[in-house]
Amino acid sequence: MVQSSVLGFPRMGVNRDLKKATESYWGGKISQRELLAEGKRLRGEHWKIQKEAGINIIPSNDFSFYDHVLDHIQLFGAIPEKYSKHNLDPIDEFFAMGRGLQSPHTPEAAAVDVPSLEMVKWFDSNYHYVKPTFQDGQNFKLSSNPKPVAEFLEAKEAGIITRPVLVGPVTFLALGKADRDQNVVPISLLHKLLPLYEEILVKLKEAGAESVQIDEPCLVLDLPPKVRNAFKPAYDKLSSLGGKIPELVVATYFGDIVHNYDVLPSFSSLHGLHIDLARNPEQLETVIGALGEKQLLSVGVVDGRNIWKANFKKAIETVETVVQKLGKDRVIVASSSSLLHTPHTLASEKKLDEDVKDWFSFAVEKTKELAIIAKAVTDGPASVREELEANAKSMEAKATSKRTNDPKVKERQSKITEEMFNRKSPFPIRIAQQQEKLNLPLFPTTTIGSFPQTKEIRIQRNKLTKSEISEEEYEKFIEREIEDVVKIQEELGLDVYVHGEPERNDMVQYFGERLTGYVFTTHGWVQSYGSRCVRPPIIVGDISRPAPMTVKESKYAASISKKPMKGMLTGPITCLRWSYPRNDIHQSVQAEQLALALRDEVVDLESAGVYVIQVDEPALREGLPLRQGLERDNYLSWAVKSFRLSVAGVQDSTQIHSHFCYSEFQDFFKAIADLDADVLSIENSKSDAKLLKVFVDEAYPRHIGPGVYDIHSPRIPSEDEIKDRIEEMLQYLKPEQLWVDPDCGLKTRQWKETKAALTNMVNAAKFYRQKYSKSS
Ligand SMILES: Nc1nc2c(c(=O)[nH]1)N[C@@H](CNc1ccc(C(=O)N[C@@H](CCC(=O)N[C@@H](CCC(=O)N[C@@H](CCC(=O)O)C(=O)O)C(=O)O)C(=O)O)cc1)CN2
Ligand SMILES: [Zn+2]
């Protein structure tokens, strides 16, 4: 029979239970025992959901209290000494690596003060993983009571034989990096790491695991030869263990693996291979050609990255072609990737219009889809006739729905002209006019937009949602928040202010809620990193802006500040990428619609007296196609055009800023330069300042504020630490070019640490301001 399988299930729980538990634990409100019990309860619930849906192959070890790559860092003992030396309890050491730890001195214990490990985007998604960080002479050691075994046994106890998931050895190393000042090439550690895979696999077999899913998603990337060549020895070694270890299924996702064709024979003695057919259906034939004689193929036909219902007819056709070639027993129907990227269940959505709700499928529903597709192929379509008919109906309803099409939007798109993409004058002319208008000092200080989203703000917003307070009351509350934030910035001595974004639930959701063409969930939370979740809005139709979205708040903020106030918008690519986009028209068309809406907003802000406007594009990098080549060039071309279209409507004297977190800017530097933004603020504090060299090499003339401290952690950077950062930056950037700002917005922080950190930041900037004004 054709089996059904899920590659991973969301961890948060139906009501973000995991978020609540971890945050309570960090806040000292629940004990470690209670936290662990909640984890166990959630795992149990999630296994049960999948079992009841009829899934044959259910994953374990997909759960994590923070991040699954961090789990592996701990599993293999790849823990930098600055964490291990404190002899923390394992779970506290785990969280210290994930989010940093700054504990006060107590009479009994020395203070701990460690920043978190670097956190980066998981392939092209909005999920973040913790980057393995290796030392020269790195050694590994399997943790006692290894998590994959413990969770397998836990499921077994509950009557479910699961398929444990491990990140594969090559991907684990390839996603890592050498620690600062270390030179180790991660993949060269393979021979030291492999024995631990053997050990864990043997233990899993002894515990009763029949098969294990080994994720090697780095196979979809362009790989350096050293990494490519690592697969064969690694998997030859593991295959040689034969019956001592469970059967292995190597999973790839988020792309095709055809360009790594020569690597595939290294897997052919393994039990099976998983490929993502939702994203790259065309790879099927090549991969089948490379399969070993008895090997299974797991076909990812239900998309793990979006919320659209699977098209049963198409999915079944695909699976049947595979069955014809391999036979029913060699085919597994699977989610294309882990379902981590989808919300928990559609059943929680009580406010969605029924017509659109019928187009969606979240994690719970996707597990049911998988079981239905597998049954249709195993027992024939008649066995699930009703489900197939309902699915065909909803596909038809969506294809013909009036919601998707707005002729006015199409008409405006057809009238876009070339000059709409260009500012009036080149940068040197603009900056002179801006300087005259804004009169900023050397090393101007600013923040990235948001200030702490306090409990009080969330409570008031929640009351508004429940109509417990009126719109006017809420607006008054927001005005008072803006007043506070302006006053605090005055006291801190910052140079360009922000209004603090108190009115925004999330920088993408907020705009989605103000644009036509979007719908929203009430419980559609998806993990972004650690305990932080987002509720991506869903694009269902053509997008337009019925009314100004941010002008009222920014105008008010500008009216009460003595210094320039920066307007704050989320750019078209970020609005697109952090929403669930439509799957019926190309993303470039959706980005252009967003750009036109934002363009009107930018011009309205300028008319309202806001002369510095930041258009955030933190997702520009993440949207970059994973491999070099035409697809990437095309993406960059339409992405850059969307940004330019959104900002180019202003006067030369209006200063356009843009912001990027996720620092790997070297590989798309040209695109960043092409944005033609007057000022860029980029996340940089966790990276080597050497990366800034690209600005020198490319003779980048405009202004830049590389972040001087990490905002993901509550840790307060000292003034000296920030000075050191600025000093390093000055090796690469000219003093007239440099802005001083944090890595990103401060919404996740508390006020106490925010004020302390910004005080140190402003003092550090003042130090350099003085130094350079003397010397010039
Ligand atoms: N979309 C998106 N992606 C992003 C980022 C981002 O800002 N947005 N930033 C980067 C890092 N990621 C981040 C992701 C989330 C958060 C974050 O703070 N998320 C909040 C939720 C933000 C939100 O939408 N809040 C809503 C809803 C708040 C809420 O939880 N309400 C309660 C009720 C109110 C209460 O009692 O607190 C509920 O719905 O149950 C609001 O403020 O209105 C969280 O997890 O806590 C921060 C950074 C990368 N990707
Ligand atoms: Zn940011």
Image (cartoon, rainbow, N blue to C red):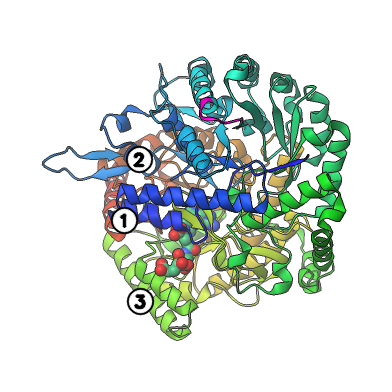
Give the SS element for disc 2. helix
> Looking at the image, is 468 positioned above or below residue 459?
below
Three-letter amino acid code of the residue under disc 1:
Thr
Q: In the rendered image, which quarter contains the N terminus?
A: top right
Residue 209 belongs to magenta span: yes
- Say which residue label 1 marks: 754
Label 2 vs 3, first from the N-terminus: 2
Asked if labels 3 and 1 touch by Cβ distance under 8 angstroms, the answer is no
Q: Amino acid at mark 2?
A: Ile
- Spot the residue most to the left: 107
Name the one closer to the observer, 264 or 581.
264
Location of residue 424 in the rendering, given as x and y in whole percent from the top left corner? 64, 59
- Check disc 2 and report the residue beneath it: 91
Q: Is residue 74 magenta?
A: no
**Residue at (44, 27) in percent of width and height:** 76
Q: Amino acid at mark 3?
A: Arg
Q: Residues within 10 Å of mark 2 (few under 14, many from 20)?
A: few
* Magenta stretch, residue numbers: 206-210
Give me the disc on residue 480.
3
Percent x, y for residue 221?
A: 66, 32
Taking depth in this image into account, of 13 and 573 the one nearest to the observer is 13
